[in-house]
Every structure is written in structure tokens, then in C-alpha cells.
Image (cartoon, rainbow, N blue to C red):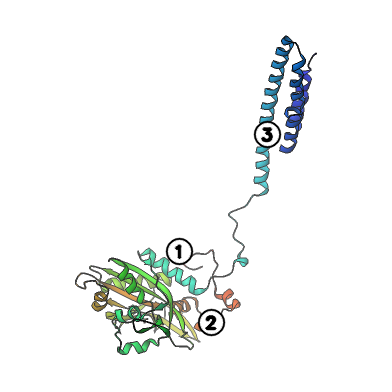
Amino acid sequence: MTLDVGSLRDQALAAIDAAADLRALDEVRVSYLGKKGAVTGLLKQLGGMDPDSRKEAGRQINELKDRLESALGERKAGLQAAALEARLQAERVDVTLPAREEQVGRIHPVSQVTDEIIAIFADMGFAVAEGPDVEDDFHNFEALNLPKEHPARQMHDTFYLEAEQNGAPLLLRTHTSPVQIRTMLAGKPPFRIIAPGRTYRVDSDMTHTPMFHQVEGLLIDRRTHMGHLKGCLIDFVRSYFESDRIPVRFRPSYFPFTEPSAEMDIGCKRSQGELVVGEGSDWLEILGCGMVHPKVLRAVNLDPDEWQGFAFGMGIDRVAMLKYGIPDLRTFFEADLRWLKHYGFMPLDVPTLAGGLSR
Ligand code: PHE
């Protein structure tokens, strides 16, 4: 019996070559090398041969098998590469194209401005700290040198809750200053933090809403003085309003938790009901500040002869209105999508000092 190994090989190699894709190639493999394939069929015939022809035929069939296997492997690699290439072409994405803007909503001015403020202070080495909206009397008042009968408590128009703690009702924090206390009790000096967040007071008119936003700043070190406070805040205002020519002034003021205390104003002018920041002869208050009172330091177990520093508290909504020309504070909280579309910011324009705060 003779085997026509040669023509089977030519046939098989032609079929491998002709296979157009991986599936067709696998069919070719099965039809030659599979259990019922042609080559396997040849192997089965070996049993009926005499020993000499069997040896020769076996060698030829194994050679054929090897040859077909390597041809299959090569073709497979070629087809896989072509398939990958085709897929890469089909799924090609131009990552340099701008995002489709309309579909992604808008960032609220308060969020935008909070991010801008964080970016500026982060650059000066301040970390972001947080505290709860529901506070207790100790953190919101007592530790900030506002004892029970202190008249300044009345200025805070506090929302009290029904729940009590240590004999005093819990409350909605009236300022972000309790985060000063929490930060200093939880860690070791030096401290350099800002704390943006929601604050609450019983108050509502054109320029006041029961919930509003503040950012607290606290820097405690061994030699920090009022000059650092002024430099830091002047730098902040100029970065924030993106102008080196913003006039600023510090007016003496009073806060129980700072001594001395000041309020910072920026220069502005009002013309035809519009407020223009950075020029003119009017002044607008944007924050309260001062050197942290020794009693506050003692309340958090720091020795005022060793540690000192400054704190400030700024109205976020107020500086957002000033920077972006938003006339009515109440519109911030009306959740009107048309308003948000007008005053909101693109989600992908994250404010950074390098890339620009606002665009
Ligand atoms: N907590 C004060 C307020 O709400 C602001 C302030 C903070 C003043 C820190 C001085 C120091 O008006």
C-alpha cells in the first residue's frame, strides 16, 4: 500500500493558506489533524503495513504532521495580528478631541469657588480639614472663648436641635471655627489647615440664607505673627481674583476667639447696580481674622507661650458672588437648572494654579 503524502501535504498547505479567518483555519486544522482528519486517517492505516513500509510511512506522516502544525501556527499568528490591527482601526479613538460638553452637566459656583480656594491654599501648604455640620456647644462656642452668657453668642442666631449632649442642646454649626478646635485636639502642632463647609444661621434676606458656606483657615506654629496673616490673605485675594491690583485693607474688629482681631475688605465700586471688584472707592468685607486667642490655645491643651498663630473665616458664597458677578445669594440654593447652566462651570475644567482657576 502506498501513501500519497505529497499531494495531501500540498492540498493541506493550500487550504491553510486560503483560510480567511481564525474560524476557517480551525476547520482546516480539524479536517486534517482532528480525530477524523485525513492525516489521522493515514496513521490508522499504519497498522496494516509490514514493518519496513510502516517505519518509512510513519516517518513521512510525522513529518507531514509537523509541517502542517507549523504552517497552521504561522497562519494563526498572521490572522491574529490582522484581526488585532483591524480592531484597532475600527475602535480608534482620538483622545485629543474635546469632551462633548452639553452632556455632562455643570459644576455649581460654590463647588467651583471652593475648589479654587483649596487650590490656592494648597499651594501655600494648607491641608483640607473637615468637621460635622451638627456640633456641640463645646466645639462651636465654649472652646472658642464664647462661654454660656457671652453676649457675642446672640450674634450667631443659632439653630438648636432637640437632642442634648452634656446638658446642652446640639446645634447646627454657626461657623467653621469649631474645625479649629477639632483639628487642634486631634493632632500635634504645627497646624496649617483650611476647612471649607456648610454653616447655618437663623437669617434670610437678599444677602443671607439660613445655610451658607464658609472656609476656615488655621495656622499654628512657634513664631507665626500678624504679618504672616496679612501676607497670606493678601496673596490669597490676589490669586483668587486673578489680579495683582486688588486693593485690600484690614480693619480692627472683635471676635472672642482671636486677639487682635480684624476684618479684611477689598476695594470695589458700585455702578448702575453692578459691583466691580478691584477698583473704585468703596470697600466690601470678605472675611474675619486674627491671632488665635491664648484661651483658645489653652482649651485645646496648647501652651500659648510656646505656640501661636492665626485664623480666619471667609464667606465662600460672598466671594463667589463677587468674582462671578452673581447679584442674588438666594439663587444659589434654588436649584434652577437654567441658572446653573448660566453660572455653572464645565466639569472637566478643574481649577489649578498652573492651568488657571477660572475659564
Ligand atoms: N468665625 C467667624 C465668623 O463666622 C470668622 C472668623 C474666623 C474670625 C476665624 C476670626 C477667625 O464670623
Above or below — where is 273 with respect to 194? Answer: below
Nearest to the observer: residue 288 or residue 23: 23
What residue did someone put label 1 on?
Answer: 352
Residue 224 rendering spot, x and y as whole percentages: 25, 70
Disc 1 marks a residue whose amino acid type is Thr
Q: Mark 3 near mark 1, Cβ–Cβ under 8 Å?
A: no
- Disc 3 crowd rating (10 Å Cα; few below 14, some 14-19, many 20+) is some
Q: Tell me which numbered mark, 2 or 3, is placed earlier along the sequence.
A: 3
The answer to whether any part of residue 17 appears in the image is no
The residue tagged 2 is 331
Marks 3/1: CA distance?
51 Å
Q: Residue at x 48, y 74 (%)?
A: 110
Residue topped by disc 3: 76
Residue 28 horizontal/vertical position (percent): 75, 31
In the image shown, does 98 or 108 lie closer to the viewer? 108
Q: Nearer the viewer, residue 302 or 281?
A: 302
Asked if 166 appears above or below 58 in the picture, the reply is below
Distance between mark 2 and mark 3 Cα atoms? 65 Å
Circle 3 — which element? helix
Q: Say how many tags the image has.
A: 3
What secondary structure is found at the residue carrying circle 2?
Answer: helix
